[in-house]
């Protein structure tokens, strides 16, 4: 039975639940927008990293370089798209 | 078909390794797909027109239930892959079934959520904001629905053919897909709901 | 009757009726011809159901050439219409439709297909692989592209063509201003072929990363393969953006949302934003493979290895990243603050640096080389100065404040044709001529090819250089006519003259294919150009398994080494070769996608539901299907190799 619940994954699960609770603090506690966003950004990206490394085994195969490159490349372009569009459509648009 | 026994079954043939790498690349494309949806959502977030704003329609309880369901299902599909690698077919099928049931429950709560939005007058045709909100959630929900059917097919195939290089490969790829949907949900949870209710 | 009224063309003219008749007759002729020659079985077994990357590549190229003539006819009509002031050959509506379809057809269905076609044919050969990573998926990619292309072309005779420009800006493309189903066609045709393109991207990344011949490290890949890898990375990250943008456009037009509307929170410029987030990388999706082709050709015909291999690779990787950082330069005039425009202005100019490096590398490759001016080399040599002019005017356009003057003028039209024609079109023609013997076993006639080259190059200069001047003088693009007093007449006439020369050039190319097919020498050997990379190491034409023995590689020019330095490419004995089976599923699925798209365009929900279920059923069938491919026995390989004149 024990081998069906490896400690690494159980810990990962508990950790991801904890991150959710931390993220919830922005709802229950009174805080500034900037602080709230900082907390959300940190918890969301840590959560994503937990999934990627612990659950998705991103680094286990011989193709891990290609896999990490794809993910990071995608992430960079995704962020550029989000913030570039916000700049063009909201912040920098009079 | 050459089978390499030093690797887990899902990696054991060349085609299997190609499938897994190819799916990772596909997930890269999915990152951009959802990034585009998020981009649009952020641009439309405050463009509510005559419709309600996010703060007016979001409800924490169903969202929290959805989050817990999906996070747990992500955990159980991970356990399913672990069981698969131990060659425990029955345990693997149990965990897969639990995952699918949790996914189904998630979908049920999401449908409840959508009817709630409908009742408070937030539909696809209300404003750019509500339209984008429902499109983003809907795209994620459609992915989950697709995943449920796909997972069911894999369940049937493992039941019928056992843990072979082909079925384990499919299961592993399915698990990648499922974890990815969980990651997307975390971002929806954080940057659509929590940010909107903050 | 009411049901059928929606299929009528909203602005019929004799020209459209004539096309309807012509299309009908051509279809009947093709069907009768195939039936008469009893070729249905051959067509189905050897081509429609094939999963062979070489055949899929050839089908892509044939489709691309067909689309080239469709888009080219549009171009000639536009140049004819504007050749004199106040011309009445086309009215405003038809002119709108013609420039829209010209743009869409040329970018999506000609250039993309041509690029992907050459990639399909060449890349697996260059890396010494037997096929792509997912042969079945490759067939689906092609057929989805084909279904999209056909759906788009159907709009011409059923329901009306899109007329909001290839950029399809809102609110013009919204229901209020585009009342026909044209823009629905645009959305669905591009959506369907876009899914196919995305799959191609995934397929080739996996192929290039995992299926290279032993010894071929990443930095020993031929340059065209490198450019294909980078291109496919851009495809994978750019096309999902188009998918969402088109989805939002479809929702707006067909499901009543307000994303790009002017009311209820909608924002019309958001379409432009998303379109160009995809659209600018798309430019590099087209040009990078062209760079790769030029690199191969210039090095082959200068008989020198490529100068600055590492900087070539590095500059492409940088271009691929930067291509996602610049899109706002397409709408500098939207009304951003100075900071925003400056940021995107600078990132745009930065792209000139890696591109410049590549230009110098090509020049230095030719430096002191033994240059042979074959047709492919002529295109490559003409490309360098012409493309540089296009690049320099691009930097002019990148200056945000000056862009207010150029925006939406013929100057812009001149600029992007100046990069696309000598950049992409010349590269495709050069690549096609270069790899033609590998595809068909004979060479295209050099003399006729040179005639075509001169017609195209001179025609290009006459067509587009005048537009720089009229553009700076203020001639707006996409206007169906202009007054005599504007003084644009003579230069536009010159453009029309140039377009005529280009049309002759393309006709000469068609004649060349016919002439060479009939008279060209067969049995030209495996390496007619004295080339350098692996695709020339196998037989001519290529056997279905590509290489009887997987080659061993030690440099980016393994084949050259085997000719000059005694490197042994093929070591060991024949072994059984595993090959994928043919499948009819991709054709059937693409057919269902066509029905799905067509039904959605016309709001025929029953059709949408039935074909949608059909598509899902195909996927379910595939999930349960057991297809392990087949094996070619050693004896069979021996026989084939003997037929080709001995083992290699």
Image (cartoon, coloured by chain):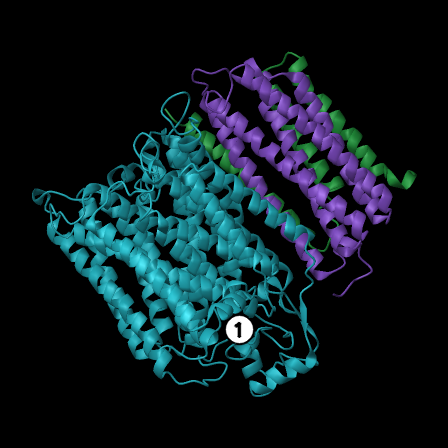
Chain colours: A green, B purple, C cyan
Q: Residue furthest left?
A: C485
Q: Residue A3: x percent and y percent?
A: 90, 41
- Looking at the image, residue A3 sits to the left or right of residue C401; the answer is right
Q: Chain of mark 1?
A: C
Label 1: few (<14), some (14–19) or many (≥20) C-alpha neighbours in 10 Å: many
Mark 1 secondary-structure assignment: helix
The number of discs equals 1
Q: Please identify the quadrant where the N terminus of chain B is shown.
A: bottom right
Whether residue C403 can be seen here: yes
Front residue (pair C338, C514): C514
In the displayed structure image, the side of residue B73 where residue C235 appears, left or right: left
Place of residue C590 in the rendered image (x, y in percent of width and height, measured from the top left): 50, 52
Residue with the mark numbered 1: C535
**Residue C346 seen in the current view:** no
**In this image, C577 relative to C563: left or right?**
right
Residue B53 x/y as whole percent: 51, 16
- Image quarter in which the C terminus of chain B is found: top right
Q: Residue at x 42, y 41 (%)?
A: C187
Counting from the top left corner in percent of width and height, residue B11 is at 75, 55
Q: Look at the picture and state if C170 lies above or below C112.
A: above
Q: Nearer the viewer, residue C17 or B174?
A: C17
The residue at 50%/78% (across/down) is C541
């Amino acid at each position: 039975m024990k081998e069906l619940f490896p400690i690494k994954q159980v810990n990962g699960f508990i950790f991801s639940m904890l991150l959710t609770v931390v993220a919830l603090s922005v709802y229950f506690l009174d805080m500034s927008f900037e602080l709230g966003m900082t907390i959300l950004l940190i918890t969301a990206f840590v959560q994503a990293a937990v999934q990627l490394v612990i659950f998705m085994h991103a680094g286990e195969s011989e193709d891990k370089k290609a896999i990490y490159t794809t993910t990071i490349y995608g992430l960079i372009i995704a962020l550029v798209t989000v913030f570039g569009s916000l700049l063009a459509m909201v912040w920098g648009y009079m | 078909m050459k089978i390499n026994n030093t690797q887990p079954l899902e990696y054991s043939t060349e085609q299997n390794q190609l499938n897994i790498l190819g799916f990772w690349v596909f997930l890269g494309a999915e990152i951009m797909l959802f990034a585009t949806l998020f981009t649009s959502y952020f641009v439309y977030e405050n463009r509510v027109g005559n419709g309600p704003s996010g703060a007016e329609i979001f409800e924490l309880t169903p969202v929290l239930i959805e989050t817990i369901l999906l996070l747990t299902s992500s955990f159980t599909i991970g356990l399913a892959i672990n069981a698969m690698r131990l060659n425990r077919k029955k345990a693997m099928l149990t965990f897969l079934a639990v995952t699918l049931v949790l996914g189904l429950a998630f979908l049920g709560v999401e449908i409840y959520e959508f009817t709630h939005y409908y009742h408070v007058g937030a539909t696809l045709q209300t404003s750019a904001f509500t339209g984008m909100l429902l499109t983003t959630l809907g795209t994620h929900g459609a992915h989950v629905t697709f995943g449920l059917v796909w997972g069911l097919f894999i369940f049937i195939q493992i039941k019928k053919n056992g843990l072979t290089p082909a079925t384990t490969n499919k299961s592993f790829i399915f698990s990648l897909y499922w974890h990815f949907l969980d990651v997307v949900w975390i971002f929806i949870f954080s940057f659509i709901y929590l940010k909107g209710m903050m | 009757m009411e049901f059928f009224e929606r299929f009528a063309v909203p602005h019929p003219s004799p020209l459209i009726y004539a096309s309807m008749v012509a299309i009908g007759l051509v279809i009947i002729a093709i069907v009768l011809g195939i039936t008469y020659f009893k070729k249905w079985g051959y067509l189905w077994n050897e081509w429609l159901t094939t999963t062979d990357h070489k055949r899929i590549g050839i089908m892509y190229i044939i489709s691309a050439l067909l689309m080239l003539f469709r888009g080219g006819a549009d171009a000639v009509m536009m140049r004819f219409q504007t050749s004199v002031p106040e011309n009445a050959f086309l009215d405003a509506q038809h002119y709108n439709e013609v420039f829209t379809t010209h743009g869409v057809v040329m970018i999506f269905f000609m250039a993309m297909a041509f690029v992907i076609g050459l990639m399909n044919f060449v890349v697996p050969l260059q890396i010494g692989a037997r096929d792509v990573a997912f042969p079945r998926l490759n067939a689906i990619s092609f057929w989805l592209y084909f279904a999209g292309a056909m759906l788009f072309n159907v709009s011409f005779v059923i329901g009306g063509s899109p007329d909001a420009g290839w950029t399809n800006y809102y609110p013009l493309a919204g229901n209020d201003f585009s009342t026909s189903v044209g823009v629905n066609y645009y959305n669905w045709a591009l959506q369907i072929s876009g899914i196919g393109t995305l799959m191609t991207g995934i397929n080739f990344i996996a192929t290039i990363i995992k299926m290279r011949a032993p010894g071929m490290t990443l930095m020993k890949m031929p340059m065209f393969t490198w450019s294909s890898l980078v291109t496919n990375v851009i495809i994978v990250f750019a096309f999902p953006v188009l998918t969402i943008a088109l989805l939002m456009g479809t929702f707006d037009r067909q499901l009543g949302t307000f994303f790009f509307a002017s009311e209820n929170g909608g924002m019309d410029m958001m379409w432009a934003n998303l379109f160009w987030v995809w659209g600018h990388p798309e430019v590099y999706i087209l040009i990078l493979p062209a760079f790769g082709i030029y690199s191969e050709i210039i090095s082959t015909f200068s008989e020198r290895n490529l100068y600055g291999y590492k900087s070539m690779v590095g500059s492409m990787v940088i271009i691929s990243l930067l291509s996602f950082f610049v899109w706002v330069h397409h709408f500098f005039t939207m009304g951003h603050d100075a900071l925003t425009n400056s940021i995107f202005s600078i990132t745009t100019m930065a792209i000139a640096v890696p591109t410049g490096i590549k230009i110098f590398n090509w020049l230095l490759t030719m430096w002191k080389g033994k240059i042979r001016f074959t047709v492919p080399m002529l295109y490559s040599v003409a490309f360098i100065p012409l493309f540089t002019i296009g690049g320099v005017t691009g930097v002019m356009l990148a200056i945000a404040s000056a862009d207010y003057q150029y925006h939406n003028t013929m100057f812009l039209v001149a600029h992007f044709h100046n990069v696309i024609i000598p950049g992409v079109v010349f590269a495709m023609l050069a690549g096609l001529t270069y790899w033609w013997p590998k595809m068909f076993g004979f060479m295209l006639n050099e003399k006729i090819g040179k005639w075509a080259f001169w017609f195209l190059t001179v025609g290009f200069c006459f067509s587009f250089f005048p537009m720089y001047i009229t553009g700076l003088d203020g001639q707006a693009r996409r206007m169906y006519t202009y007054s005599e007093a504007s003084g644009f007449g003579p230069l536009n006439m010159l453009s029309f003259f140039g377009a005529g020369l280009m049309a002759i050039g393309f006709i000469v190319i068609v004649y060349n294919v016919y002439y060479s097919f009939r008279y060209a020498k067969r049995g030209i050997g495996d390496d007619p150009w004295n080339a350098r990379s692996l695709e020339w190491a196998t037989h001519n034409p290529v056997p279905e398994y590509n290489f009887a023995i997987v080659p061993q590689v030690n440099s980016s020019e393994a084949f050259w080494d085997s000719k000059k330095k005694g490197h042994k490419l093929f070591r060991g004995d024949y072994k059984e070769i595993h090959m994928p089976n043919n499948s009819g599923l991709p054709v059937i699925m693409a057919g269902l996608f066509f029905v799905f798209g067509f039904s959605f365009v016309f709001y025929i929900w029953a059709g949408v539901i039935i074909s949608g279920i059909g598509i899902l059923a195909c996927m379910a069938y595939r999930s349960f299907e057991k297809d392990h491919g087949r094996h070619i026995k050693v004896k069979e390989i021996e026989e084939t190799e003997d037929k080709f004149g001995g083992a290699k």
